[in-house]
Amino acid sequence: MLAGEIDRRERIDLVRQGGGSRRGRFALGCILSLLLFSHKLVQAESTHPCSENVGFGPLGIRGQSYFQMLHLTPTPSAPSTLRKGEWEGQALLTWVNGWAVSKDHYMIDTETLQWTGKLSYALNDRIQFGFEIPVLWRGGGYLDRSIEGFHHAFNLGNGRRDRFPRNRTRFEFHRKDGSTFVLEDSGIGLQDAVFSSQVSLTCGGAKVPAVGVSLSVSLPTDREEKLYGTDGIDVSGTLLFAKRISRVYIYLNFSYVRLGSGDFVGIPLHRDKWVGFAAVEYRLKEGTSLILQNTLSSGVAEDFFEFSDYTDEMAFGFKTAFTNRLVWEMGVIENLFNIRNGPDFGIHTGLSYRF
């Protein structure tokens, strides 16, 4: 009896172990099938018609000159390669040291950390919609000493930085009517939310560039006297071009912006703004590119010294793909050609994920 009972139990255990093994093989098969399906899906996504002329695209750096930052300046982009029904989420972070001073006229001495979350959806292979919301931290920061040291090391001018306290935040504007605006508060706040749409007109070919158009609208989320946004609704239209030549991709953007407000803390503004952008992407190896880009924006102020002049923001960095869905970007920002009204130095990084 005892031997028979033991034998029966052993057979039951073997059946259970076999069932567990079959369930394990089934689960493993499901996982492998899912991975294979995902791989095929990613492979299909990479064959978007515009991929012939569009690489990773420009670094996603919004305008960082302070007058430009608070108004709508379209983020550099290329004709979309999102497939029908596909989403893309982006998290972008830009850290900038701002320094601009003109005796008896104005002073901007601050550091900003701007986080931008953006979500895009492709209605089909040619039409996409997007929403982005930036959050801005403003304070004294930590970069002043490093920037001064860099300038001294290369015998560059410091713009009278050494005459003022380091790592503080101060905005001072002496208006034409004799009044003065001063803000020394650090803090964090929402910037204007942006809704956008884009249409790819053509994906081009061996001789013709890819061409797209985009429309963006910014909606105020805070009062302008706090210097996080504006009180107006800004609207922009942009022409987008992209062309591949061997391992090089060239991107051009031309934008017109209509500002919703003709005044900024008592300083009269031009209601019309023009933005030009150019970038070169070099495919260093499969999955990694180097990117050099520059943004020129027309002056926003009607008659307020250097802020009536154009702003220039150059950036250099890279993008690299961790997977076919996940891309990391990083770069540095410098105002090489017009140092009186733009960001002195900045660092940018971001992640993009398609799903």
Image (cartoon, grey):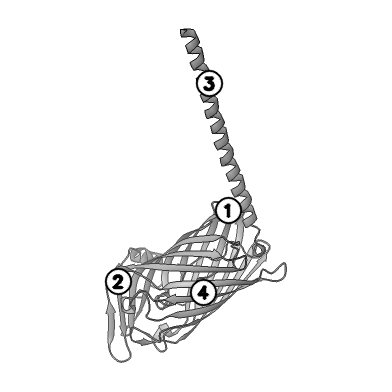
Q: Which dot, 3 or 2, sits closer to the camera?
A: 3
User: Callout 3 environment at 10 Å: few (<14), some (14 to 19), or many (20+)?
Assistant: few
Residue 185 found in image quarter = bottom left
Residue 105 or 201: which is nearer the viewer?
Answer: 201
Direction from residue 112 to residue 39 in the image, left or right: right
In the picture of the structure, the residue carrying the numbered disc 1 is 324
Secondary structure at badge 1 equals loop
Q: How far is disc 1 from disc 4 in space, using C-alphas?
A: 28 Å
In the picture of the structure, the residue carrying the numbered disc 4 is 295
In the rendered structure, which amino acid carries the disc numbered 3?
Answer: Leu
In the picture of the structure, the residue carrying the numbered disc 3 is 14
Q: How far is disc 2 from disc 1 in space, using C-alphas?
A: 41 Å
Q: Residue 206: x and y, percent?
A: 72, 67
Secondary structure at badge 2 equals loop
Residue 123 or 224: which is nearer the viewer?
Answer: 123
Whether the residues at callouts 1 and 4 have beta carbons within 8 Å, the answer is no
